[in-house]
Image (tube, grey):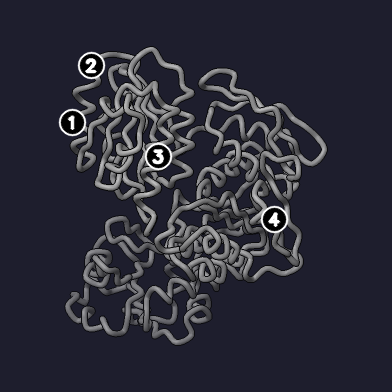
Amino acid sequence: MTYDLYFFKNALPNAKIKTYKKDSNNFFSEKKIKGFCIDSRKIQKEELFIALSGQRVDGHYYIEDVLLNGAIGLIIQKDKINLLNKINEKVLNGKIVIIVDDTLDALKQLAKNWRKGFKFPIIGITGSVGKTTTKQLLASIFKTAKISAFISFKNQNTVIGLSLNILKMRKEHKFAVFEMGISHKGEMEELANILRPDIGVITYICNAHTKGLGNLKEIINEKQKIFKYFKSDNVGIIWGDKSFLDSYYYDFPIITFGLKTKNHIQARMIKNVDSNFTKFNLKIYFKKYPVTIKSNHLGFINNILAASSIATFLKIETKFIIQGIQNYKDFEGRFERRKIKNNKGILINDSYNASPESMKAALKAFSALKNEGKKIAVLGDMLELGEKEVFWHRQIGRILSKNLDLNKIILVGKLAENIAKTMPAILKGRTTKVKDWKAAKELLDEMLLESNNQILLKASRGIGLDNIIKDLT
């Protein structure tokens, strides 16, 4: 499936389209555009390069490189058109150049126009935590049921990521699932306008990105804007354990999930078999189904309930829902278990991001893991918490009273230093403060002399704890 001339003219009516070829009328019939790319290092043949002007990098200064590397053409801004004059005519031969006022706006318009061509159910997932895991659980269910579905790539959930993923949808799909992540007010409304989901999902609400979103009430208001363009035939699927979501009036159907009995989809009789497995009854309306998962993380169960709610509404057979859940494997950076080199133990990679709630859940799950060797927690700054950032880090110190089995704690970053101020005295002697992930890595190298170690990596993505993983695992 490719993008023809009509698509571009319809999506970008004010754009100027230039083809560097004698017989330009037949260009689109001879060469097909198969995709879009914004990273000059990853351009593929028959892809169109969209030159975005970012705060750090301007893609316009790489347009010759992408053409030499096989790009079929470019989308550039008219105020950068002079850069074409510096490119050899031979390099431009057989290429297409689309000239627009603003390339980011053009990307959004292309995505909105492409979205209009699909009638199958499109699911948008948001929430303070659990978006990616819920999405990947749903992917596992689809795979088990042998359903062709488009699943957005990793955590590409901003305006740019969402738009690029929309442009990858194809007619052969039965469903499409997208993450919708926000860190500032007004972003959700824009995402919802681009995607126009048929099904909107809110996985969980807690204090995350408070610097840009405000207090909990303001976060709720922003997240609920996923429903901004909903009509009576759309469906909302929401975490129902707290009244601040399900107490609102919705003029469209709502499905709730959670641990409380008031929800349509519930987890009942949760029991940790050991430190690695959990059993519970998945209650879908009035029927119960036994489920066993390889995790002791309570947040993971909430994600399972969200994915099960979506799959149930899509009328996927329950046996495939349960099999898909039980077949699910850890996803990168979300309490992901990896073996440390030379049989030195297990590393829990939860370094993708961190909020007070997810930090608390990770520490609780880590504490429940049984181990004969050392237990080491590497905890870094939780970013974007605004005025209460010191308060929330001190709260984590208090929570550590339930993690007295930790043999060593490494605090990474200036904010993380506040954790030590409120932690139990017995842990302070086991705690070391370092400025960055490199210093943390050096400490870990010195500690991993024996076998059966367990290491937890937990911090906001900007702290870079993921850099430690490549060397240790």
User: Looking at the picture, which amino acid does disc 4 mark?
Assistant: Asp
| Amino acid type, callout 3 | Ile
Q: Earlier in the sequence, mark 2 or mark 4?
A: 4
* 143 over 91 or under it: above or below: above
Q: Residues within 10 Å of mark 3 (few under 14, many from 20)?
A: many
Indicate whether 216 appears above or below 427: below
Work out how far the residue at label 3 is from the one at label 1, CA to CA, in angstroms. 24 Å
On residue 396, the disc is: 3
**Who is closer to the viewer here, 382 or 324?**
382
Crowding at label 4, few (<14), some or many (≥20) Cα neighbours within 10 Å?
some
Mark 1: which amino acid?
Glu
- In three-dimensional space, the C-alpha distance between marks 1 and 2, rounded to whole angstroms, equals 13 Å
Could you tell me the amino acid type at mark 2? Leu
Res. 473 visible in picture: no
Contact between marks 2 and 4 (CB within 8 A): the answer is: no
Question: Real-space Cα distance between discs 3 and 2?
Answer: 29 Å
Upstream in sequence: badge 1 or badge 2: 1
Left or right of residue 111: residue 412: left
Residue 449 is labelled as 2
Q: Callout 1 environment at 10 Å: few (<14), some (14 to 19), or many (20+)?
A: few
Q: Which residue was labeled with disc 4? A: 246
* In-image side of 14 versus 114 (left or right): left
| Label drawn at residue 247 | none
Q: Position of residue 23 (x, y in %)?
A: 38, 81
Point 68% across, 68% down: residue = 230
Give the vertical position of 78 relative to 193 (above or below): below
Residue that mark 1 sits on: 442
Labels 3 & 1 near each other (Cβ < 8 A): no
